[in-house]
Amino acid sequence: MKVEDIKNIAVIGTGIMGHGIAQVCAQAGYKTSITRRRVELIQESIDKIKSNLQMLVEKEVITKDEADNALSRIHGRKNIAEAVSDADFVIESVVEDMDVKKSIFREFDKSSPKHAILTTNTSSFSITEIASVTERQDKVAGMHWWNPPYLMPLVEIVKGEKTSDETTNVIKNLVTKLGKVPATCKDSPGFIGVRLQSALVNDAISILEEGLASAEDIDTAVKMTLGFRTPILGPLETVDLGGMDTFFYAYDYLYKKLGEKYKPPDLLRNKAKAGELGIKTGKGFYDYTGKSIESIIKNRDEWLMEQSKKLKEKMAAQKNK
Ligand SMILES: NC(=O)c1ccc[n+]([C@@H]2O[C@H](COP(=O)([O-])OP(=O)(O)OC[C@H]3O[C@@H](n4cnc5c(N)ncnc54)[C@H](O)[C@@H]3O)[C@@H](O)[C@H]2O)c1
């Protein structure tokens, strides 16, 4: 199957996530079938999409015609069987309950065309386990969206043990066609984003619980540092630019003082010892051979300058309110 073969998408579940996912599919030109458990309320879900689209029109992100066309591609269906009956691609976004998800995947397998790819928006469950109830485990994958789906750029693609490369590639291409950015991960608890976020959130709560800083100061510290820089630098790029050795010394100290939870991964220790320090030595998590370090730093700094300017303007506008 190729991404061009996808014409009809079915989104099952229209809660916080599902209605926004359906909106993205319809905006990208796909005929999108939706259904929900309390199907008598399906118009409410369509109205939520309509209101999101109206906001995008008001903010001049899309035109009124584009909004109307997207809405005309959304079709409420009376049940799952009907919604997936002509689907080339299915996105499940119902309650985070393994038994419910398994029973819905059995239904997908029975009622959707044999070529259809089946995906789940689970935030935590094993894709391999969900896929196991179907006769097409090679065509089942995780597709983890972020809230609100119509505004957040990333969709994680999670490969179950039996998900084929062909399926992964089709999903990757579809994510791009939907105007989103894909990141692929093997099946594991929390995938990439949720696992990273849990490290940050758990420690923020621990700092608060230990009475070390106020909630406001913790949130400010994150927004003005990690949050501020993260859009241009991921954590591994941050280490490469800051120095593998420097991060290792700092994290090793935390480990000695705060305990096992903070033990630096072997990969960090080994790279620091091997002199793979990042831009300082031309190799870290990335290889900088043939790349201009100066332009990497210039690019980062120009981006941060622009962000600082925007932030100052926003803060000044808020003061004047
Ligand atoms: N909320 C988030 O920030 C977020 C982010 C990423 C992924 N997710 C995942 O998306 C999925 C949906 O989450 P949500 O936040 O939209 O939840 P929600 O509670 O807003 O919506 C859940 C949907 O599931 C349906 N549902 C509930 N019980 C059902 C049942 N027994 N059979 C069939 N349908 C049933 C509801 O009608 C509703 O449409 C979950 O797997 C969740 O982990 C959520």
Image: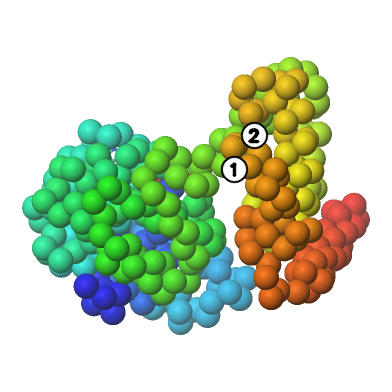
The amino acid type found where label 1 is placed reads Leu
The residue that label 2 is drawn on is 264
- Whole-Å distance between the Cαs marked 1 and 2? 8 Å
Residue 212 in the image, given as x and y percentages of width and height: 80, 22
Toward which corner of the image does residue 320 lie, by quadrant? bottom right
Kind of element beneath mark 2: loop
Horizontally, is 240 left or right of 90 in the view?
A: right
For disc 1, the neighbor class at 10 Å (few under 14, some 14 to 19, many from 20) is few
Residue 280 in the image, given as x and y percentages of width and height: 79, 58
Disc 1 C-beta below 8 A from ligand 1: no
The amino acid type found where label 2 is placed reads Pro
Residue 108 in the image, given as x and y percentages of width and height: 16, 52
* Ligand 1 picture quarter: top left
Q: Residue at x 61, y 76 (%)?
A: 60
Q: Is residue 104 visible?
A: no
The residue that label 1 is drawn on is 267
Q: Is residue 263 above or below residue 272?
A: above
Residue in the foreground of this view, choosing between 223 and 195: 195
Horizontally, is 246 left or right of 89 in the view?
A: right
Horizontally, is 225 left or right of 22 in the view?
A: right
